[in-house]
Image (tube, rainbow, N blue to C red):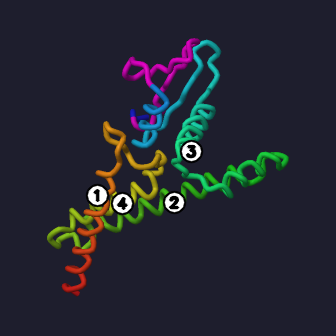
Amino acid sequence: MSEKEKPLLIKRYASRRLYNTETSDYVTLEDIAGFIRDGREVQIIDLKTGDDLTRQYLLQIIAEHESRGENVLPVNVLNDLVRSYMVPGGGMMPQFLQSSFEMLRESQAKMMENMSAMNPMSQMPGFEAMQAQQQAFLKAMTGGLSGNWSGPKKDDDGDSAEQGEDLEDIKKQLAELQKKLSKLS
């Protein structure tokens, strides 16, 4: 099993501090969210008891992002999740969610594959830039879906205006490329 496939082991000490076993340093919940956004699976284990705490910490990360106004889950979805806990045996919700996210990841992968070098348009000037912009757009819209989007990344001042400007630049460049493509047709 390669390093990327093997979950990153995080140990929780009695002091509740979280320890990254790969880098031998302490990490925060935000660090763990970053690992996940980057496509890395994590496993969080209580050092004393050996209990797997991954689920608990992932829910805590989601709750913290939601409480900061980074609303990823609509209220009706949250209501459905709560309802699913009321159904004996948990209902179909866990399987449905897992299947839905797998289909979304597969669709994203197919879309990126269709834009690959096998595409005849890849010989066109500017295609690589357009492909990079499309990948950035998909990642922003789906949060990479190996790790979920937590809203716009903020710079040191906590300001996300620069990302908004970058997105506008990307939109303009994409529109220009679409015009050029339509002229070539």
Outermost left residue: 125
* Quarter holding residue 97: bottom right
Graded by Cα atoms within 10 Å as few (under 14), some (14 to 19) or many (20 or more), the crowding at tag 1 reads few
Q: In whole angstroms, how far apart are the C-alphas of marks 2 and 1?
A: 28 Å
Q: Closer to the N terminus: mark 3 or mark 2?
A: 3
Q: Amino acid at mark 4?
A: Phe
Q: Nearer the viewer, mark 3 or mark 4?
A: 3
Q: In whole angstroms, how far apart are the C-alphas of marks 3 and 4?
A: 22 Å
The boundaries of the magenta stretch are 4-27
Q: Nearer the viewer, mark 3 or mark 2?
A: 3
Q: Which mark is residue 104?
A: 2
Image coords of residue 34 (percent x, y) = 42, 37
Magenta stretch encompasses residue 16: yes
Image coords of residue 174 (percent x, y) = 27, 70
Circle 4 — which element?
Answer: helix
Image coords of residue 63 (percent x, y) = 59, 40
Circle 3 — which element?
Answer: helix
Circle 2 — which element?
Answer: helix
Q: Closer to the N terminus: mark 2 or mark 4?
A: 2
Q: Which mark is residue 137?
A: 4
Residue at left offset 61%, top offset 56%: 74
